[in-house]
Amino acid sequence: MIPTHPDRAAGLGFVGETQRFFWGIVFALSVTIAGVLANEIVYAGVSLRCYEIPMLGYVVVVLLVFLGPLLMFMPRMIEAKIKSLHDYSALAVTHNQMSDGKRVQGNNPKGEPVLGTPEISSLADLGNAYDVLDKMRPVPFRPADAVVLVLAAVVPMLPLLLTLMPLGQILELMSKVLV
């Protein structure tokens, strides 16, 4: 693992990105489940409210099946982040003391000019590396990857809401929520 990798996942971001592409499988399964539920609701008279907990459980299972295995990286990623933040903090202190001594205190060897020395760019590089470390995620997937899977699981079931209330009421409720 490389904690300063720009993917903010120690170089493992590609693993999380691949999980997002399972949305097609989740969507197809959700369409099938929605069809079975619609049959139960329309022909057996079962209320959609009876399926609230199982539907929520389904979404949780989808997340656990497709993103759960990636949680095995979590302890090592957290450990790498903490260690790297500590190491880079110590390096930054040393570097800033040396830079301050050279530029502000005038301890520059051989009378080198203060301006125009290339070492000043290392301050920016160090700051950028620390910023990447600070924003490193504890898991190799982004929240957007989970959202894609949740939407693939939920969207096919949305028409079932029409069994609880008419479309006009649903649109009115959505307009109130969005405004």
Image (cartoon, rainbow, N blue to C red):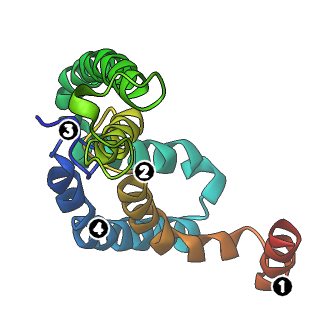
Q: Which mark is residue 70?
A: 3
Dot 4: element: helix
Dot 1: element: helix
Picture coordinates of residue 32 (x, y %)?
Answer: 33, 71
Residue 56 vs 14, above or below: the answer is above
CB atoms at circles 3 and 4 under 8 Å apart? no
Mark found first going from the N terminus, 3 or 2: 3
Q: CA distance from mark 2 to mark 4?
A: 14 Å
CB atoms at circles 3 and 1 under 8 Å apart? no
> Label 4: which residue?
23
Picture coordinates of residue 40 (x, y %)?
Answer: 49, 65
> Label 2: which residue?
143
Q: Nearer the viewer, mark 2 or mark 4?
A: 2
Q: CA distance from mark 4 to mark 1?
A: 30 Å
Q: CA distance from mark 3 to mark 1?
A: 42 Å
- Residue at 28% x, 33% y is 111
